[in-house]
Amino acid sequence: MTARGFADGARDVAAGMRFLRAHPRLWVYVIAPALVTLLLMALATAGVLAAAPPLVDAIAGWLPDAIARWSHGLVWALTVIALGFAAILLFVPLVGVIADPFNERLAAEVLTVRTGVARPAVGVAALVRDALVGLLRGLGRLLGAIVGAVLLFALSLVPVIGTIAAAVIAGWLTARGTARDCYEAALGARSLERPAIRAFLARHRQRTLGLGATVAGLLVIPGVNLIALGVGTTGATLAALDLEADPPRVGGPR
């Protein structure tokens, strides 16, 4: 990844924020999932705090008595860091499941404002179908994230090197997953099928991952993380318009 491609992705996020500020009525699609996100964050924080003490005690029990006393603080820090990585890794796909229908509608509204062409009305049956497909897809990503979180947690228990490696891998996976969520909503609003979306992400890997990394960074900032995916989706929608005025469709309308 070049620095320029990464910076372009970051600028796309900033452009998304400016666009939302210029069109206040679009905020309803950002605030609604943000309220659910707030509840999930509270539950995740409570879960980490509840899981840490017994886990620390269990790990400390494996250590020899000679080092158990002075290493307790280190074990506590590593455990909280590991659980935090796991929570962040699970947080993105879980929030993506909830925010997906809002983000695709947000992307459709951004397209209407930007191009002046309204998206044709979608029937109730199609809305239900798309919601179920999105839910199943999101649950599949969540299951994969759970497996990844378990593996990264095990890796992070290796002192220093393992913790650093787990942090780097978790960051990359989070950035990649966030970019996919934002661009799936942005391009899905243009009736692109998943193969076409994957092809778009491959063609513009550096810029899309730059956006994903920026949004992922915003997801760890209290308050800002509540609107990060909506802002990222808006930026991705605008970027897709700039990158490919008429991206190829695969399989016809969704």
Image (spheres, rainbow, N blue to C red):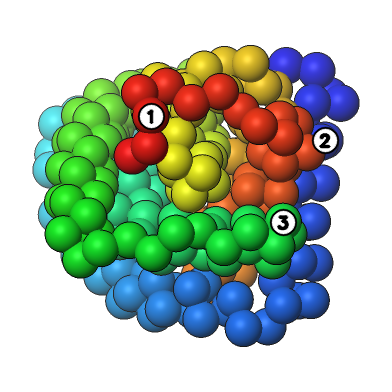
The residue indicated by pointer 2 is 7
Question: Badges 2 and 1: C-beta atoms under 8 Å apart?
Answer: no
Give the numbered dot on residue 252.
1
The quarter of the displayed image where residue 51 is located: bottom left
The structure residue drawn at horizontal position 39% and vertical position 64%, both measured from the top left corner, is 121
Amino acid carrying mark 2 in the image: Ala
- Residue 25 location, x and y as percent? 62, 83
The structure residue drawn at horizontal position 63% and vertical position 59%, both measured from the top left corner, is 117
Residues at marks 3 and 1, CA–CA distance in whole angstroms? 21 Å
Residues at marks 2 and 1, CA–CA distance in whole angstroms? 33 Å
- Where is the N terminus found, in terms of image quarters? top right
The number of numbered discs placed on residues in the rendered structure image is 3
The quarter of the displayed image where residue 173 is located: top left
The structure residue drawn at horizontal position 19% and vertical position 44%, both measured from the top left corner, is 133
Give the numbered dot on residue 115.
3
* Nearer the observer, 115 or 104: 115
Q: Is residue 96 left or right of residue 48?
A: right
Amino acid carrying mark 1 in the image: Gly
